[in-house]
Image: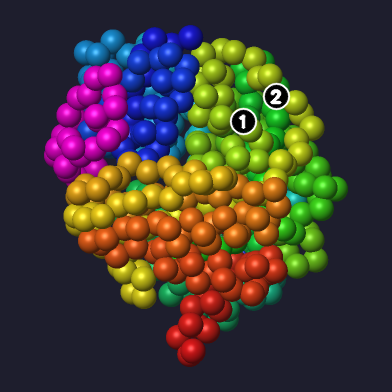
Amino acid sequence: MFKRILIANRGEIALRINQACRELGIETVAVHSTADSESLHVTYADESVCIGPPASTDSYLNITAILAAAEITGADAVHPGYGFLAERADFAEMVAECQLQWIGPRPESIRLMGDKAKARTTAAAAGVPVLPGSPEPLATPAEALGLAVELGFPVILKAAAGGGGRGMRIVHTAEEVEILFTTASQEALRAFGDGSIYLEKYLVEPRHIEFQILGDRFGRVVHLGERECSIQRRHQKLIEEAPSPALTPELRREMGDAAVKLAQAVGYENAGTIEYLLDQDGRYYFMEMNTRIQVEHPVTEMVSGVDLVKQQIRIAAGERLEIDGDFEPQGHAIECRINAEHPDRFTPSPGRIDTFHPPGGPGIRVDTHVYEHYVIPPFYDSLVAKLIAHGEDRAEAVARMSRALDFFVVEGIHTSIALHQRIMADAGFRAGRLSTRFMERFLAQADTS
Ligand code: ADP
């Protein structure tokens, strides 16, 4: 097992990895920007190294500084968390070249699945259903138009290198193709340094259902069931839950088996997520694979009893997976992402937290890096805390979440707590009537009432 892990991240996920290391008796090295020297991920680490000024390009994305920090502190492995360098195959390779163990999938898997067009082709070849669309990136708007007409509108244009909803455009008519193709491509080029665009059929009211998988170095792959992440705003997840209210045990088995088959086909190692869209007729389609631990991993931990971050570390250390292949969810878990943002405008609300009193009690888990008088810097994402509620069934999980939100006191900044309270009280949400357009309707309804 490793002696010392360098955590190449910040915020709640850096703390989460620290917790897993502690429990495994592994020392931790934190890296931080000058804006984060007062952060808990630094306080709780055995050692810490400042790697640069606030801007992430100069710090959390500064590969040279991070590798130097690993070298001077004598770390033997690197955990990238999510975001930042987590899905950079070149970073994973450099980590290995420095004789450090990368806690994540092999660089080839990151590269293959990071290209969404290639990932689609790979899924199709493994026998996993994909939406009708272009097998290769499209060269010109004219090519996109031809295919869109063939498939029928609406279609969605996506950046091959995409993530976080950027470089995506929904196209409803032939007239829009050219302009939307150009703007999506430009946005993708700016965000990812790669303007390649592909196209697929757009489902009007799907659910976002993703499967957690784990694979070890010996070719064994298991899934730990699904998370439903249909509550999104602008393609960004707000609430996730496990299991999905829409899945029968049969459909869970079928989609889970397909996820395992795909991971096996690419020799996938470590934790990963296979994202699907589920249409209203119960048909599912592969959307993409994320080759890292996800923000919403706690809901899976709550219904599986498996510590996913510890599993990641064990797998990277060469241990065999000792988890049954016949997953069944235990109870129900929901996660609300509490963001520092204005409740109506959704604009960031950084600054000093005057009062911070997180809830507790039965079935409640709070993953956070903030504390009273902490100053949220304006340079990074706006996640303040992940509030997770677990119950025997969905109704109990919802009741616990509502109660926990009511008892969650954050003063000094704006947060999304009130928004989550309203969603928990919504009749459609309570009935499990979810789709990726849930928020659009919910917000429109709030505007008119
Ligand atoms: P990103 O990696 O940028 O987050 P994804 O491919 O995961 O992009 O898609 C994000 C969200 O966009 C999905 O959860 C879903 O709401 C929507 N979406 C993506 N593809 C489609 C599609 N073909 N039809 C309908 N909605 C889609």
Task: Answer left or right for 107 relative to 377.
Answer: right
* Mark nearer the N terminus (2 vs 1): 1
Image location (x, y in percent) of residue 66? 26, 26
Residue at mark 1: C-beta within 8 A of ligand 1:
no
User: Which amino acid type corresponds to the residue marked 1 in the rendered image?
Assistant: Val
Depicted 224 relative to depicted 425: above or below? above
Question: Magenta includes 277?
Answer: no
Q: Quadrant of residue 435?
A: bottom right
| Circle 1 residue | 306
Task: Answer left or right for 283 relative to 420.
Answer: right
**Contact, mark 2 vs mark 1 (Cβ under 8 Å):** yes
Cα separation between marks 2 and 1: 9 Å
Question: Magenta includes 48?
Answer: yes
User: Which amino acid type corresponds to the residue marked 2 in the rendered image?
Assistant: Ile
| Circle 2 residue | 323
Residue ID at (38%, 50%) = 358
Depicted 378 relative to depicted 141: above or below? above
Element at label 2: loop
Name the quadrant where ligand 1 sits: bottom right
Nearest to viewer (mark 2 / mark 1): 1
Comparing 391 with 228, the one in front is 391
| Start-end of magenta stretch | 34-58
Image location (x, y in percent) of residue 405? 46, 59
Comparing 62 with 176, the one in front is 62
Q: Could you tell me if residue 74 is visible in this image? A: yes
Q: Could you tell me if residue 181 is visible in this image? A: no
